[in-house]
Image (spheres, helix red, strand yellow):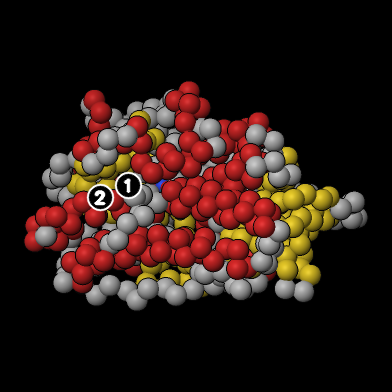
Amino acid sequence: MASATREYDCLVVGGGPAGLTAATVLADADLRVALIEGQRFPRYKVGESMIPYNYFPLARIGMIEKMAALDFPKKYSVQFVGRSGRQSQPFYFSEHLDHPCAQTWQVTRDVFDASLMDNAREHGVEVFEGLRAERLIEEGDRTVGVECSDGPGGSQPFVARMTVDASGGAGLAMRNLKWRIDDKGLKKWAIWAYYRGAKRDPGRDEGATTITYLEGKNWFWYIPLRDDLVSVGAVGDRDYLYRDTGDLATIFKREVGKNVWIREHLAPGRVEGDYYACVHTSYRARYCAKAGLVLVGDALSFLDPVFSTGLYLALVSGELAADAIIEGFAQDDLSGKRFRSYGETMCTRIEILRRLVYAFYARDFSFKQIITKHPHLKGAITDCLIGHLDRDFSELNRGLSEFLDLPDAITHGRAKM
Ligand SMILES: Cc1cc2nc3c(=O)[nH]c(=O)nc-3n(C[C@H](O)[C@H](O)[C@H](O)COP(=O)(O)OP(=O)(O)OC[C@H]3O[C@@H](n4cnc5c(N)ncnc54)[C@H](O)[C@@H]3O)c2cc1C
């Protein structure tokens, strides 16, 4: 049975980092904001390692002091480890950055996302948990709200001048409007688990992310979390991971046995809970916005997680989209055109990272080669890895092109005007 229509200035679908950032910034501008989240929090989510420039959107929504109280491991560095266990010099962010953001965090997502949600409520966002947005409501070519369901038969229309789609990989708009376009060169499988009591490196390396290689361009992540847990995942091609069995525990243990560093670090620990698996294809929506609708975070685009950029893109897109909406309300214009600059900025940043991901997976290429030949390009690579993307990377592109064929830039993902 349909309930009475609810009216707001803005609706945000999805209570992940993208949606909660957008909603909080919008509420701070005195707009009436409803956030619709299909699950009840806290809820599990993978995607735990942050990069330094996540700091700035978190600061904007008043989260930095709260992060300190949440007891997440502090991340000062990333290190890359070869198959034989040979460790590169860890890359410390403070060598490149003289700013508090040089220390970032490894977050347990149920705790982090719930804290973002509490924060959004404190800033005036009205949150509806356990309510699914089923479809966009369209009037002509304008989105005017969403039809929600809170269980069998119960439906409720929410209307607003602006809808933010932050529904993650479920992609409400991508599904409703058939906007999802896969980046077929980046399709990978992941199998992961959580270990209690596994080894942590000493001192400031305790919270480091380690990326360590398997055969080919397959790899492991090792992310120390709070409560003595470590998130460990193997990522690779289907033919590699699933070559002789489909049993997750067997595959995981087989791959652990192939990597000295991982084996030694996991030895004192034990698996807690289930093994998890997913296949992730990178994608970008055909458009980032149209009249009355804007897409943020994974609802706009997903990029292979090797450089831990998902949360960065979620937080930054949430903030930038909200700023464009606030300006749209001020100018009384919430047309697709209003999001031209948002689309350009997001597509440019995603493209910079996408090229680097392709380089990571390119056969017979390693970043060591380019840094040996062009030492001055280390700074540009570092900027990509910390999230400092607001600069010119054409020299880096030229350098990379000497070693590999970079993919053609994706031309979709701008605003529909
Ligand atoms: C294997 C793997 C490892 C990763 N590792 C990292 C990492 O180390 N670091 C990193 O930064 N990123 C990582 N990521 C990426 C990261 O998880 C995502 O980029 C990030 O969670 C995106 O945030 P979001 O807010 O856009 O979406 P989400 O966090 O997915 O939030 C979307 C929310 O929308 C809700 N929702 C969906 N549909 C509806 C609906 N119809 N109605 C109402 N609510 C709805 C969902 O319940 C969910 O709470 C990883 C991803 C994968 C697959």
The local secondary structure at tag 1 comes to helix
Q: Is residue 40 above or below residue 399?
A: above
Task: Decide if residue 85 is on the left or right side of residue 34.
Answer: left
Give the residue drawn at x 63%, y 39%: 28
Task: Decide if residue 166 is on the left or right side of residue 147.
Answer: left
Q: Is mark 1 in CB contact (under 8 Å) with mark 2? A: yes
Identify residue for label 2.
382
Q: Is residue 296 above or below residue 184?
A: above
> Mark 2: is the Cβ under 8 angstroms from ligand 1?
no
Q: Amino acid at mark 1?
A: Ile
Q: Nearer the viewer, residue 29 or 405?
A: 29
Crowd class of label 2 (few under 14; some 14 to 19; many from 20; radius 10 Å): some
Give how far across and how far down residue 87 sits, in percent. 15, 43
Give the residue drawn at x 24%, y 25%: 203
Give the residue drawn at x 72%, y 73%: 141
Give how far across and how far down residue 317 sits, in percent. 51, 53
Identify residue for label 1.
386
